[in-house]
Image (cartoon, grey):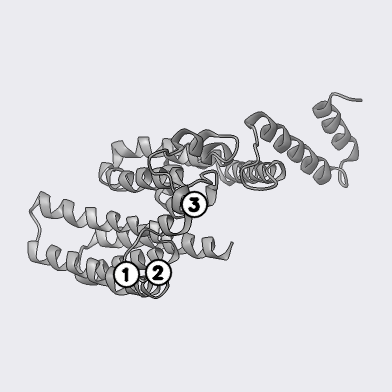
Amino acid sequence: GLAHGVEFFAAVLVPRAWLALRDRPDLRRAALAGAACGLVFLARSQDGLLLLLPAVEIGRRLLRGGEDRRRLVMAGAGLAGAFVLVALLQVGVWQAVYHQPVLIPHQQIHGQEFLLQEPQLAGTLLSPRGGVFLSHPILFLAVAGLVVLAFRDPAYVLAVMPMLLAGWYVNSSVFDWYQVRRFTGLVPLVAPGLAVAVRPLARTGWLAMAVLAFVVLRYDLAVDALRRIPGDPAALRAVVREAADGLAADAYGLLEPRAPRLAVQLLSAYTGEP
């Protein structure tokens, strides 16, 4: 929906602002990072956890020493101040609607169905009903890439891990844990891992990347075809079969006007029928 598009856009701003802050941790860049975190908090309050990314960067530099301590303290104050300034809009809404300035929206909305003591941790990742890795295997590839990235840029991976783990736990605690849309705000954080994972493929040229993108799209469409409503099971084998059927149909449709005989031969080879 539109709200998730806004959430994704705001979440993309956070690592972008973090990169600028990492290059030069001054007051202006810290304030921009805080404002970006405040914006994603407005889109989805749970994503306020993304504030940890620039906060950990400033804290790491303070602990390491060797830099202008006053400048880093000012950057930290700018980060916090800008975040609070933007987040006050949400605080005002909570006060007006729930008569509480600070709260956990999941508890207000879901009540007894927000089950922090019984999270569906495995199901949220791997269940055919809506496990994020089965629904979008490209995200598994991205997380695997983070493991590799940890050897090159441990500061980044260590900074995002608490956010990823906290988001996973909270999403697993809601009664409809199979709603993969709740991971929207975390996707930009694993994007660097995906870049690392597909780098060898990217070196072969744009065609290989285009094929990968097309296969990912076909897989997503297959999941949507099998999962009419959230929570409907879409087993891996069924999704792969549906995606393969779609790819075969696309190939036939592309070839048939130009090379009908080849198109028929390919379709026959795929179906096993003359």
| Residue at mark 1 to residue at mark 2: CA–CA distance | 8 Å
Whether residue 267 is visible, yes or no, is: yes
Front residue (pair 149, 182): 182
Q: Is residue 133 left or right of residue 35?
A: right
Q: Secondary structure at mark 2?
A: helix
Give the residue pinned by disc 1.
101
The spot of residue 77 in percent (x, y) is: 18, 68
Q: Is residue 24 positioned above or below 200 on the image?
A: below
Give the residue pinned by disc 2.
98
Front residue (pair 75, 118): 118
Q: Residue at x 42, y 59 (%)?
A: 108
Q: Residue at x 46, y 37 (%)?
A: 120
Q: Is residue 78 left or right of residue 98?
A: left
Mark 1, Cα crowd under 10 Å, few <14 / some 14-19 / many 20+, is some
Give the residue pinned by disc 3.
182
> Going from the N terminus, do you reach mark 2 or mark 3 first?
2
